[in-house]
Image (cartoon, grey):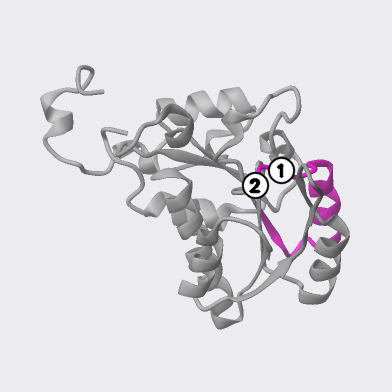
Amino acid sequence: ILKASTNDMLSGYSPSPENDTVGPLKEHLAAAIGLPPQRIALGHGCKDLLKQILQHAVSEHNSKLRCLIPAKSWRYYDSLAEQVGARVQHFAMQQTEQEFSYDIADLHRHLASFRPHLLLLASPNNPTGNLFPLEELETIATQYPETTIVLDEAHHGFIDKALDGGGGAWAHHIPNLLVLRSFSNLYGLAGARIGYAIMGEGLEGYQNRVDRYIGFSRIA
């Protein structure tokens, strides 16, 4: 990174001008995914994008924000929900001697009774490593259109693509789906963190929120 950097780039850790424009990275990602660049948002890694999503959601729902989170998942989800004062419920995970899996029946019970504004999922899940069955995304989106589904795929690059092509393709036809990915984990970018969100066509409000934020650095 240092060899490829210019003095101008290294003179300040300021935001990239591509944050709120359609630059080369957005164009490349949009072409690879098959969506308009306006449906791609860039940010300072998945952690930053998640924070923006929660903050936007609470601005829409005030103190009434409801979040549904897996019982065994990244602690950061609960931490963010706590920071914005959201009500949180957890749905169960199933466990055998060899693996974990999402309890889909319990997920649907909570969706029906709790009616969350945000459903936070990860595939693969951190720390259990299990994948979310992507065919369930369409069922959830159809039955609960008021729920924004956030699918965190920060670790997607570490799995066999033949097993799971990822949730990005599902954002083509699921308007309330938001898929997160990161370059930071897979490529070991350390301080040069950068990630992106793939947004369903019904999530323009999240796009506007992320584009107004400071975003990623010039080095990233």
Task: Give the x, y percent position of residue 149.
Answer: 69, 55
Secondary structure beneath dot 2 equals loop
Q: Which residues are magenta?
A: 129-150
Of the pair 65 and 16, the residue shown nearer to us: 65
Task: Give the x, y percent position of residue 16.
Answer: 29, 38
The mark nearer the N terminus, 1 or 2, is 2
Q: CB under 8 Å between callouts 1 and 2?
A: yes
Number of other residues with Cα within 10 Å of mark 2, as a class: few under 14, some 14 to 19, many 20 or more: many
**Gap between marks 1 and 2, in whole Å?**
5 Å
Q: Amino acid at mark 2?
A: Asn
Of the pair 205 and 51, the residue shown nearer to us: 51
- Residue 148 belongs to magenta span: yes
Task: Give the x, y percent position of residue 1.
Answer: 26, 23
Position of residue 60 in the picture relative to residue 11 (left or right): right
Task: Give the x, y percent position of residue 193.
Answer: 36, 39
Position of residue 19 in the picture relative to residue 179 (left or right): left
Residue on which disc 2 sits: 125
Residue on which disc 1 sits: 130
Seen at 53% across and 55% down, the residue is 206
Quarter assignment of residue 181:
top right
Seen at 48% across and 30% down, the residue is 186
Position of residue 111 in the picture relative to residue 216 (left or right): right
Secondary structure beneath dot 1 equals loop
Position of residue 53 in the picture relative to residue 71 (left or right): left
Q: Amino acid at mark 1?
A: Asn
Seen at 43% across and 27% down, the residue is 187
Quarter assignment of residue 13:
top left
